[in-house]
Image: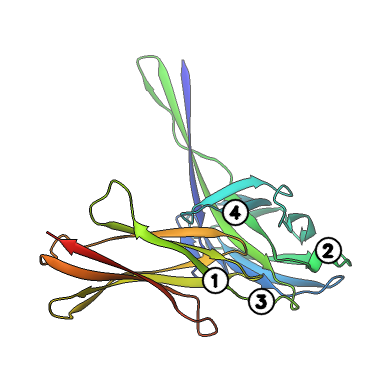
Amino acid sequence: MKILISILFSFTLNLNAIAQLPGVSVKPVRLFYTLLGGQSSAQTVYVLNNTDKAQQFKIYTEDWSRDSTGGHIYLPAGLCPQSCARWVSLNKEFLELQPGESSDLSVKLQVPDSALSVAEMKWTMLFIESTAEKTTPNQSKGFTTQVNNITRVGVHIVQTPPNLTEKDLKMLSFSKVADSVNKFRITCKNTGKVQFDCKSYVELSFVATGEKTTINKNTFPLFPNQTRYADFVLPDTLAKGKYTVVGVLDGGDDLPLQASELTIEIK
């Protein structure tokens, strides 16, 4: 009897300039386009085989979105309403690299010449995925186990028409998480037209002394119309007494800080 175990290592990096993983290095991992209708532009992604064996890679696009925790949700190319996957053309859809060899990949984005195509941001994901590397089968008691190792790197492709500039952020709520003693949640929404990075944190102030503590400065990207929440856990070492707890959202220098305040008592 033969059992095939396939292991997929899927990595999508959006905050670093380069992805360095076992088997492959890719840079950059974010491509930003600012095109009008009818315009096109090409950017270059560099792929390096950083192993001591020849490697093969297939290259393709998938759609994706973020859930309320920031996790990625993947869909076939062209299914997301904001997809630009069908606008992407590649000079290569397959790479074969010798040990230490690198290759460049041209990623061209062609925006259709229509008002609808530039009415909102568009995005997709370009994946560079190694083909299966088969390990030596192990046999035990009539069973054969074969493991396929796959490395996958995601490159974010984002198209923001230059006429879209509206940036807006709303704090929807700041509250204690139900059924939790010391967890609080900020919920926010990007109500503008462009993606931007948002910073959220909680400030504690001990009423008796005025001593302040800042908890968990989290920075995360927000797509237009995306709702996101961030949870904060208060330290167990807090002295007993009353505190003001302020949830803060910082959308950048061009947006005002937003804050909401609660009063709690540690007993």
Q: CA distance from mark 2 to mark 4?
A: 20 Å
Q: CA distance from mark 2 to mark 3?
A: 17 Å
* Nearest-to-viewer mark from 1 and 4: 1
* Nearest-to-viewer mark from 2 and 1: 1
Residue 187 visible to an observer of this rendering: yes
| 117 left or right, relative to 216 | right
Q: What residue does disc 2 label?
A: 116
Q: Amino acid at mark 2?
A: Leu
Q: What residue does disc 1 label?
A: 169
Image: 198 above or below 235 = below
**Among the 4 quarters of the image, the one containing residue 236:** bottom left
Q: Position of residue 68 (x, y in %)?
A: 49, 54
Q: What residue does disc 4 label?
A: 65
N-terminal of the two: label 4 or label 3? 4
Q: Position of residue 179 (x, y in %)?
A: 28, 46
Q: Residue at x 66, y 51 (%)?
A: 63
Image: 4 above or below 115 = above
Q: What residue does disc 3 label?
A: 166
Counting the numbered discs, the total is 4
Q: CA distance from mark 4 to mark 3?
A: 20 Å
